[in-house]
Amino acid sequence: MATITSISLFNHPKIGDLAIDFGGAKHLILTGPNGSGKSTALLALAVELETSRYATLRSRLRLLDQAIALGAPPGFEQRSKDGLKEERQDTLHALDSPGAVLMSGDEVLGRSASSIAAFLPSRRSFAPSRTNRPPQPPTSSVSRLLHAANEGFYEWLKHQYLQALLARADGKDAESEALRSWLDWFTTLLRDVWQLPDLRIEFDRGTYELRFIEPSGSYWIEDLADGHASILAIVSELVMRLDPEDWRASPGIISGVVLIDEPETHLHPELEERILPFLTGTFPGVQFIVATHSPIVVASIPDAMVFDLRRREGTLSAAFAGKKYGELMMSHFGIETDFDLNTTRKLHELKELALRPGGRSDPRYEALLKELETVENPVVMSELLRSLSAADEA
Amino acid sequence: MISIKRSPVPPASLSGGGYDGDDVRAQLESDFLGKCYLCERKLDGNWQIEHFRPQAGRFEHLRTEWTNLFPADSCNQNRKKWPAGERIDATTAFPSDGLLDPSDSECDVEARLVQRMDPRPVSADDLVFEFSAVDPTDLPARNTAIELSHIHDSDGQNGRTLRIALHGRWILVLHDLLALQRALNRGENPAEPVKRLRALLRATAPFTALLRGTIRAEYPDLMEHIVGR
Ligand SMILES: [Zn+2]
């Protein structure tokens, strides 16, 4: 299983030298205030994973060392010792050059069919939409790390549904069963992470589109809530980088490294807290390296090294369990707040309701306002003010 | 940003060729009500004299010109770099269409600029500002709005400490707005909260323009009570 256990950056133009030891933890969470280089570090890692420049240089250096020691081994017959030494010097120089990244651990770059490497930048452009045409069979999948692979995800998913229907119509029961079971599994996954226990997904034969059905009504792919679409962007990126065969067998066998910049994008606090537990639970063999602005994300999984890029200091995430939200905000994000996680979640919810049309007449709004009444926070105070002035008018 | 009255008489030391004499500092501090002309924080010991039109380049002759000198704290490091014109890579702190001059007696800054923020930030880093020109064709006002946004939204430590201070101040204001609203609801005399709010919003207090602008936009009825009908 591919696992990174330490990362070093050498002379990076923005970050300088950096050494991160995972301290036995499986995952890595990079934190720090804006401008501390979270995204930059993540990108440097992604580039290194993509090109494995450092690994190549290092193995070349080893080869050259052998060649110099043994004198003209196979492959080097034509080379003079001086020439070899010169190349060794150049290789060494390249290794010292700005921005070199070294990762150590098991053979990180040995990729197999069931191994994954993915990088999700913070601006994820994922906007699937309906075509009302029969789904096109998928073209060959993109496997380059730095390019999004999920562009064709929705089309691919529709195709899976269509194939399942066709297989059944043709009496190919085994094939139909295999496709169905994967689609059922995938639906269960979405139900779980979206927290929509009654969600069903159906292939609409009239329009060739997928219909998302809930007790309250049905909707199309474009109508997904921002937070749900944001999670689907991450999940689909992983799905599209894998061979469905592996998935059908067991997602547990998938290994690899996935880098995500700001997994919390567009998520409300509830989902923010669930995203990493969900991903690490669904892909137990995958190592996640994320950069985040969110104290909620930091405290959400037990098995991570949390590395503060400003202080250049790591802490095991287990130490954050039960810690006050305010302390986390102060220590890792430089933000001043005194509230615990639960209060902060309520504050976010209150704010969201206040900004939503008609949200102030939601019974939850009054209930929250009552619960939070004594909290000295602008969200509560300005909402309290609103409701008092409404009472005055009435 | 608020308008202030600049003393018509230039401090004496300016005629000697320097621009940062003690008399200049004292006069600026008093004319600008002890606040940074950009962010309206109280001036501490480390404030600098800023050349409104930069002293390097085409405004060199304004180096010791009294009306070109302004008091600013560290927030001025986040002043916007404007294109300098003829050379594409050259920048200047002063745009070609100009900026609002808060010490110009002809210029009513608060009347020309919308300055307010979202009244309900969860934390200091959650503050959302709106700076815009009341009249979109008013180019100096537009430039000043851009400059103020730049300063208030800046990522670094300067921007953060500014937002933390504003957040704290806004909580104080909300406190008294709540007291005022409660008094009104109960039919009590609101004199006490009104007095405290006037103190928080007077020109010598920090962040006058943003606090006033936000209350005016969000709680216009309460603003009427504060200014007195
Ligand atoms: Zn300032």
Image: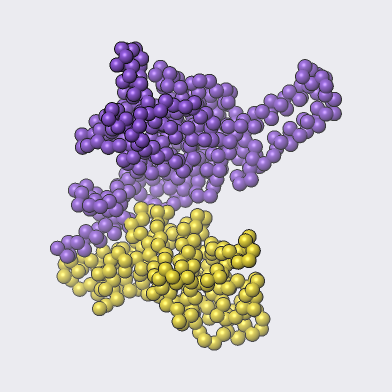
**Is the residue B223 above or below the residue A352 in the image?**
below
What colour denotes chain B? yellow
**Is the residue B138 above or below the residue A253 in the image?**
below
Q: Position of residue B49 (x, y in %)?
A: 57, 73
Residue at 43% in and 61% down:
B165
Q: Is residue B205 visible?
A: no
Q: Nearest the camera: A208 or B171? A: A208
Q: Position of residue A372 (x, y in %)?
A: 26, 51
Q: Is residue A209 visible?
A: yes
Which quarter of the image is occupied by the C terminus of chain A?
A: bottom left
Q: Position of residue A23 (x, y in %)?
A: 53, 31
Residue at 40% in and 67% down:
B115
Residue at 33% in and 12% down:
A172
- Residue A178 lies in what quarter of the image? top left
Residue at 49% in and 40% down:
A121
In-image side of A198 versus A242 (left or right): left
Q: Nearest the camera: B90 or B175? A: B90
Of all chains in the rendering, the one displayed in purple is A
Q: Position of residue A144 (x, y in %)?
A: 54, 31
In-image side of A312 versus A74 (left or right): left
Q: Nearest the camera: B172 or A237? A: A237
Residue lying farthest to the left in this orientation: A394
